[in-house]
Image (cartoon, rainbow, N blue to C red):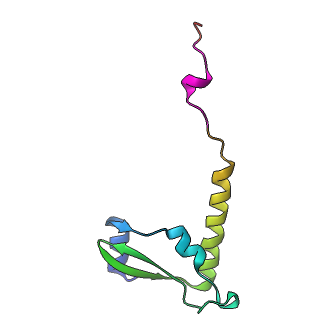
Amino acid sequence: MNPKQKAKFQHGTVECQDIAHQIHSQKTIQEGGQGKPLIRVKLVGVLVPINFSERHLIEVQELLILATESAKMVPRFEKESETHSSPNG
């Protein structure tokens, strides 16, 4: 991204269709990809491609996998009012 796009990304409206799918569907050259991984986002209403190096793509894919696994491991707590009775009975 150029400096103007970076500013829009940081301070403007960012829209993206299923970013996790876009990232996971990219392939490295060894996996049969074209070696030019990118995702598409809308920055302030304008469609912009974000290019990745293959190394960065792999790192982001692994981070997404770990985040997904961690989210599955976090227990979902019931509302406190449902799990604890009041001290007065």
Q: Residue at horizontal 37%, vertical 67%?
A: 14
Q: Residue at horizontal 61%, vertical 20%?
A: 84
| Start-end of magenta stretch | 77-86
Dominant secondary structure of the residues highlighted in magenta in the image: loop
In the displayed structure, would residue 76 be above or below residue 82?
Answer: below
Q: Residue at horizontal 54%, vertical 90%?
A: 36
Quadrant containing the C terminus in the rendered view: top right
Q: Is residue 74 left or right of residue 38?
A: right
| Residue 81, picture quadrant | top right
Q: Residue at horizontal 44%, vertical 69%?
A: 17
Where is residue 34? Give x, y as percent: 59, 93
| Residue 16, picture quadrant | bottom left
Q: Nearer the viewer, residue 33 or 50?
A: 33
Where is residue 1? Give x, y as percent: 41, 82
Question: Magenta span has 23?
Answer: no
Q: Is residue 61 left or right of residue 2?
A: right
Q: Is residue 76 left or right of residue 9?
A: right
Q: Residue furthest top?
A: 88
